[in-house]
Amino acid sequence: MIHLIIFHYHFLPGGVTDVVVSAVEAYLKYSLEIEKITIISGRVENLDKIRDRICLTLTPAEQMRLNTVVMEEIDYQERLQPPPSIKALKKKLIGEYCGDGNIWWIHNFHLGKNPYFTGALLDIAEETSQRMIFHIHDFPECSRYELLNNLLSTVKRDIYSLVGNIRYAVLNSRDYRFLIESGIPEKMLFLLENPLAVNKLMTGDIPDVSKILTKAFSKDFPGWKSDQPYMLYPVRSIRRKNVAEAAFISSLSDANVIVTLPGVSDRERNYSHRSGEIFGTGLAPGLFGIGADLPKAGISFSDLIAGASLILSTSIQEGFGYLFLNSLNWGKPLIARDLDVLENFKPAFVDFDALFYDGVSVPASCLDIPELIGLYRKKVHRLSALIPEDMVKDINGEIDSLFSRENIDFSYLSLEMQIDFLKQIKNDSELFNQCRKVNESIINHIKNFFITDCSHRKDIIEQNWSLPAYSKRTDAILHSFFTQTPLPEHDRSPNLIYESILKQFLSLPYLRLLYDE
């Protein structure tokens, strides 16, 4: 039986933490391979709460198989003064956690948040027989160029090792394809979509949520329409969530939208504040950042979901996409920007009220196109040290093609441009109607979905994303260490895989100006 040791920089509230909580619950209840689990965090904050959250669903015997440990050396580099050396970190990891019965499970091992930890892991993988699973939620090659530079300046080697005691797990079929095409052998790579608990479906009486929201919050959000239904966008306001587009859609459809939480990290706080001002100044109908204040208003998050007419997502990038699956779980219609990571999800929505739209259009005649082109060319130039020379020309060609069209996708504007455009349509009825016309399909779907009664899709979720299904897929990864024939040695030039993955992400959808806010 296996002692699974799970590493992450921290377990503050967020996507990775949610996955680990559900995963550990699944393993302790359903895994046929795992005997005990140790969670190792770079920070003490929230770790006890995470353990308590996991243990809520476990028997006393299952709880005894779970342990938590703090190892400050694997926290974010910015919090470590002085940072650890790779040599010292290797020695500690090997001395305390190596073992034939141990398998290390590392989340976002190469994100660039702690390159010393990454370097130590790669060295240990090649110098010992310690089995490791690198679970990739996010890529530094995808619009996180500062982190990539930070990583490469410390780890001067191929950041994707191909030794036989490593396995890779990814969240979606796009990432799986990218890694296969970049040279990761199929035997080392596994698609492991996140688990979704199906026992949290809403039941019971639903209060008059709109009336409660109007009483509690409308004075702070003058655009709120008390007589109109609301769309729910239950996310933190971070750059990739493209919140201004949700405001644009709500304005065009004459309906409210609720963005539940503000962004809290240093990198996202300014974007979140400016996005919140859209609603705080009445530029668009809706509410912003009210999630934490729901109890004061006398309602729960479940009530907020129950009162929504549909779920909206304007996100331009997702690693997995809990929001999309939750629309099935909650029995709510879905309007969402189409993303390349969703190809495995879409069959689940065939008989469900959902629209995956390609873009939201604005007339090019109302934009400063030369300025837009200039901003994108400057961005490409700034990245020229990372971008292969042959690709610069291709990207500039994409820029010329995108901005030569009659209508431009709203998501390719900077946040400042998006806000300016919202002000324009607020004061120009002719432009407002023009925008309504070019986005007629989205608006019509919204109005139709407002009168639609969806059913929960518990059967689909249980089959594909339930905790037992997740545990079974994880067992297959663990089992692969003991059943596969040894992988052949790979003779590759340094950084070939990382360079190939970087190229996969070097296209305009991953270079939007919103990432620079």
Image (spheres, rainbow, N blue to C red):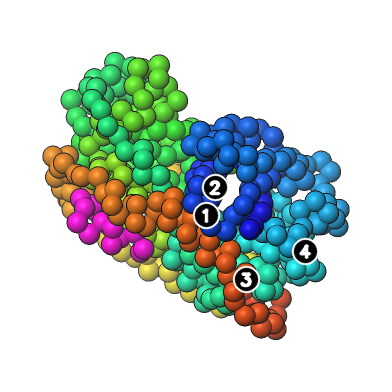
Q: Residues within 10 Å of mark 3 (few under 14, many from 20)?
A: few
Quadrant location of the N terminus? Answer: bottom right
Q: Is residue 95 above or below residue 248?
A: below
Apparent side of residue 425 relative to residue 193 in the rendered image (left or right): left
Task: Check disc 4: other Cα within 10 Å, few if <14, some if 14-19, many if 20+.
Answer: some
What range of the chain is rendered magenta? 343-356
Residue 330, horizontal then vertical, whole percent: 29, 41
- From the image, tell me which residue sits under label 1: 31
Q: Are marks 2 and 1 in contact (CB under 8 Å)?
A: yes
Kindly identify the amino acid type of the residue bearing the numbered disc 2.
Leu
Which residue sits at x=41%, y=61%?
341
For the residues bearing labels 3 and 2, Cβ distance under 8 angstroms: no
What secondary structure is found at the residue carrying circle 2? helix
Using the numbered discs, state the Cα–Cα distance from disc 2 to disc 1 in whole angstroms: 6 Å
Could you say whether the residue bearing mark 3 is in a helix, strand or loop? helix
Which circle marks residue 124 in the picture? 4
Q: Amino acid type of disc 1? A: Ser
Q: In the shown orientation, is residue 80 left or right of residue 254?
A: right
